[in-house]
Amino acid sequence: MTTTNSTDNQQETFRDRLGTVGEGGKRVWIYPKRPKGKFYTKRWIVAIILLAFFFIAPWVKYQGEQFLLLNILQRKFILFGQIFWPQDFHLIVLGLITLIVFIILFTVVYGRLFCGWACPQTIFMEFVFRQIEYLIEGDAHKQKKLARQGWDFEKIWKKTTKHAVFYLIAFLISNTFLAYLIGSDRLVQLVADGPLPHLGTFIPLVIFSGVFYFVFAFFREQACIIVCPYGRLQGVLLDRNSMVVAYDYKRGEPRAKHNPLEDRSVTGKGDCIDCKSCVTVCPTGIDIRNGTQLECVNCTACMDACDAIMDKVKLPRGLIRYASEKGIAEGHNKLINARSIAYTVVLLLLVSLMTSLFFFRSEVEATMLRVPGTMFQEYGPDKLSNVYKVQLVNKTRHDVEATLELENHSGEIILMGGPLKVPGGSLIEANFLVVIPRDSLRMSSTPLVISVKHGDRLIDKNKVTFIGPNDIDKN
C-alpha cells in the first residue's frame, strides 16, 4: 500500500528498516507506555473473556466428558461438547478451509482486527506479561531507567522476580495446553503422582514452558513482525478499502507544536501537534503517521493516546482512527458500505455452513467392506453367502444397539458374534454374512444396499457388492 504521508518530499526511509532494529543491526528494546482510553478498556474486557475461556474450558464437563478436548494420541476430539472421530476428518478439513476463507475475507474488509483484539500472542503479551512488567518495574520511563542503571539490589530483585513470575505463568499456560491435549482428569493425576514417574511428559512440558517464557520475556513483538505468517500476508490481503488503524494526514498535516494562543486553522497548521504520544504507546515501536505498516497489529493504543491529546488541546477526536486509506484520501469514511456488507454476508454464510457441517453430522457412522480375499460360499443347497466386515462408530454418549437390513434385495443378514452393541463414544468391528437365494441373482456382481438401524430409526446406509459364480452371467 502507498504511504499516507502527505509530505511529498519526505523520503519513506522508515520502510527500509524495522523500528525494533537499530542502525548497527542491534535490537532496539521497546518500552511502550501503558495505554489508557475507551479502546484499551474494551480490549481489557475482551482479553478477560478470552483468558477466562482459555483457562476454564478444560475444566468444564459436559455430560461427564471434557467440553473441549484435542487428544491426538488417542484420536479423540471433543469440540464444544460434540465428539469427533478420525472418520470426521473431512469435516475438520472443510472447517479449516472455511476458516481460512473467513480469515482472508475478514482481513480484506476489517484489516488486522484479529491481531489487536483476539490473537493469543497479543492477549498474553499485553494483558498478562506486560501487566506483570508494569506492576514490578513500573511504567515505560521507569523501565528505561531500570535498564540503564547498574546491577544494584533494586535491579536484581526486580528482574529476578519478573522473570520468575514469567516462567511460572508460562508453566501454568503449558499445563493448560496439556489439559486440552490429554484431558484435565489425566493432568490432575499426573500432578498428584509427581514428575518422577512421568518424566516423558514432564520434561517436554518444562521445555515448552521455556519456549513460551522466551517468546514473552525476550522475543515479544518480533513474533508478530518476523514469525507470524498472517502478519506477513497483510501486504497481499489489504487494499485501499480495508479498514485499518490509520492516521488522517489530510487533517493532521502539516504538523506543528501546540500553541494555545493561536488558531491552527488560520495559521494553516494541521491538527497533529507532533507530541509523539502515538509512538510512545506502540508495542511494536512504529510511527502510525507514516502510514499502514507491516508491524502495526491494530491494537488501537495510538488511537487512545491521540484522542487523549486531542481532548487536552480541544480539537476533535479521531485524528487516528479506524478508517480506510481511500476514505481518508477522499475525505469520507464509511465503515458500512456495499463492499463490507457483501463480504460480511459471505462470512456469515461460511460460518453457518461450518456450523451446520459440525452439528448436523450423523451420530452413528457405519463402514462396510467385503472381507478381503474371500469369495462366495455355498450356504445350503440353494443359497450363496458373502462375508463382510462392519465398523460402527458411535459419536453419541449413549449406547446404541444396531441392526442390519437388506434394502434392495431378498435375502438375510446373519451376524457373527452376537448383537451389534456400541457403547457411547466407542467403536466396534464385527463380521456378518449376507445370504441370498441363488435363483434370485441375475449377475455375478450384485450391488446391495444395507441399512443400519437403531430400533426403527435409520441411522446410516452402506453400499456393498455381493459376489456370485461367473456362470450366472451366462444364463
Image (cartoon, rainbow, N blue to C red):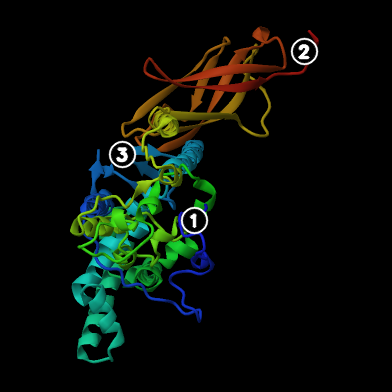
Label 3 vs 1, first from the N-terminus: 1
Residue marked by disc 2: 473
Residue marked by disc 3: 81
CA gap between label 3 and label 1 equals 48 Å
Residue at 28%, 77% (x, y): give it: 163
Q: Classify 234 as above or below 368.
A: below
Residue at 39%, 64% (x, y): give it: 287
x, y percent for residue 376: 67, 23
Seen in the image, is 3 located left or right of residue 355?
A: right
The secondary structure type at the circle numbered 2 is helix
Disc 3 marks a residue whose amino acid type is: Gly
Kindly tell me whether residue 238 is visible in this rendering: yes
Count neighbours of disc 3 (C-alpha within 10 A) and say few if under 14, some if 14 to 19, many if 20 or more.
some
Disc 2 marks a residue whose amino acid type is: Asp
Disc 1 marks a residue whose amino acid type is: Thr
x, y percent for residue 197: 33, 69
Q: Could you tell me if the residues under marks 2 and 3 are in contact, i.e. CB atoms within 8 Å?
A: no
Residue at 37%, 37% (x, y): give it: 334
Residue marked by disc 1: 3
CA gap between label 2 and label 3 equals 52 Å
Q: Classify 398 as above or below 444.
A: below
